[in-house]
Amino acid sequence: MVAVMGSSGSGKSTLLNIIGLLDVHDSGDYFLDGKLVKDLNETKAAQLRNKHLGFVFQSFNLISFKNAIENVALLLYYQGVPRRKRNKIARETSRK
């Protein structure tokens, strides 16, 4: 677990958006899973996010018509995990 702390305007959200492949960095090199992310198109960036990153937003951004387990299982749906397996994983993960 990592905590990113700093005063308002210090770049915390910018850093997290860059790490999460939501924003593009100005300089330097950023590798995720050995892949240089500098010139990724949105599809490739989304694939890397799907495989390697997870987000918990301050406002949670939950889907209102789904329950908590279904919200947790949604990522697994997009990864092609069968329903029974993703529901089992979501239930187990939610207990922790």
Image: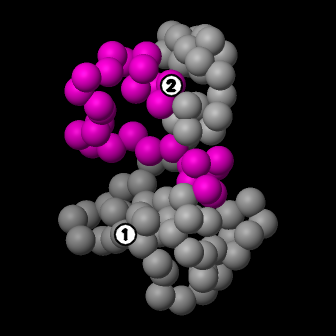
Kindly indicate whether the residue at mark 2 contacts the one at mark 1 (C-beta within 8 angstroms): no
Q: Quadrant of the N terminus?
A: top right
Whole-percent x, y for residue 80 in the image: 64, 34
**In the drawing, what numbered circle is on residue 14?**
1
Whole-percent x, y for residue 60 in the image: 29, 36
The answer to whether residue 15 is visible is: no
Examine the rendered structure and indicate whether residue 53 appears above or below residue 31: above
Examine the rendered structure and indicate whether residue 76 appears above or below residue 68: below
Whole-percent x, y for residue 14 in the image: 37, 69
User: Residue furthest toward the bottom?
Assistant: 27
Whole-percent x, y for residue 49 in the image: 56, 54
Q: What amino acid is labelled 2 in the image?
A: Ala
Give SS at disc 2: helix
Residue under the point 40% across and 26% down: 71
User: Residue furthest toward the right?
Assistant: 34
Which range is magenta? 47-74
Q: If you read the primary sequence from the N terminus, does the residue marked by circle 1 or circle 2 appear first?
A: 1
Looking at the image, how many numbered discs can be counted on the residues? Answer: 2
Left/right of residue 10 with respect to residue 15 in the rendered view = left
Q: What amino acid is labelled 1 in the image?
A: Thr
Is 79 or 96 nearer to us in this picture?
79
Image-quadrant location for residue 61: top left
Residue under the point 49% across and 16% down: 94
Report the colour scheme: one colour
Examine the rendered structure and indicate whether residue 7 appears above or below residue 28: above
User: What residue sits right under mark 2 in the picture?
Assistant: 73
Examine the rendered structure and indicate whether residue 85 appears above or below residue 26: above
Q: Residues within 10 Å of mark 2 (few under 14, many from 20)?
A: many
* Magenta stretch holds residue 56: yes
